[in-house]
């Protein structure tokens, strides 16, 4: 089969660019330790409500590094607690898990978006710049009540 010179040049260029992108993604994720926000720590899903790491459910607590930690547990078909109040403009560290099946955690209109996998603790830190009542929705299909699984993240103006 005859492949024209220019076509061959473009094929090699495209192959090189794809290989370069894969290398950049691979090396940077290794160097910076990038990983999905879930799978940070393991936890027994049947004991999340008695686990000491979730003893502050519903009580955002100020940590020594200045972040505010919010612990929440998802289960069919609600979040515990279903409503959390946090201040605007402060780093908020969410510590989340599921007591049964895989659930989603999407704070609409913000970049807070994670998956809650039973057996693992999901952790991420975000800042809500503006006050408001943000709808929290489950965006992983978790059963017949999935569409009714929601909560509220109430971001209050900082004092
Ligand atoms: Cu929980 Cu869908």
Image: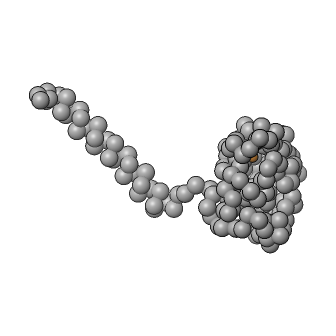
**Residue 67 position in % (x across, y down):** 75, 61
Q: Nearer the viewer, residue 77 or 89?
A: 77
- Quarter of the rendered structure image containing ligand 1: top right
Rendering coords of residue 71 (x, y %): 79, 60
Q: Number of labelled discs?
A: 0
Q: Give the residue at x 28% y 43%.
A: 16
Q: Quadrant of residue 147?
A: top right
On screen, 67 above or below 6? below
Q: Is residue 84 left or right of residue 118?
A: right
Does residue 67 appear in the picture of this structure? no
The answer to whether 93 appears left or right of 55 in the picture is left
Front-most of 125 and 66?
A: 125
The residue that appears at 23% across and 32% down in the rendered structure is: 10
Residue 110: horizontal and vertical position, in percent? 71, 41
Query: Could you tell me which quadrant the N terminus lies in?
Result: top left
Toward the front, the furthest residue is 144
The image's colour scheme reads one colour
Kindly give the residue lying farthest to the bottom in the view shown. 52
Image quarter for residue 27?
bottom left
**Residue 37 seen in the figure:** yes
Comparing 75 with 85, the one in front is 75
Point 19% across, 34% down: residue = 9
| 101 lies left or right of 83 | left
For image coordinates 83% across by 44% down, the residue present is: 151
Residue 78 on image: x %, y % = 83, 48
């Amino acid at each position: 089969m005859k492949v024209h010179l220019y076509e061959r040049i473009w094929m090699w260029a495209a192959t090189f660019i794809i290989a370069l992108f894969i290398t950049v993604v691979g090396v940077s994720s290794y160097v910076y330790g990038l990983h999905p926000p879930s799978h940070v720590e393991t936890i027994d899903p049947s004991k999340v409500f008695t686990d000491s790491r979730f003893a502050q459910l519903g009580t955002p607590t100020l940590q020594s590094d200045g972040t505010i930690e919010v612990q929440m547990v998802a289960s069919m078909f609600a979040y515990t607690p279903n409503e959390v109040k946090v201040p605007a403009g402060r780093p908020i560290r969410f510590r989340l898990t599921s007591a049964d099946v895989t659930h989603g955690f999407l704070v609409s209109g913000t970049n807070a978006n994670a998956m809650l996998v039973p057996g693992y603790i999901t952790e991420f830190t975000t800042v809500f710049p503006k006050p408001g009542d943000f709808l929290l929705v489950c965006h992983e299909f978790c059963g017949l009540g999935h569409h009714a699984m929601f909560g509220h993240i109430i971001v209050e103006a900082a004092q």
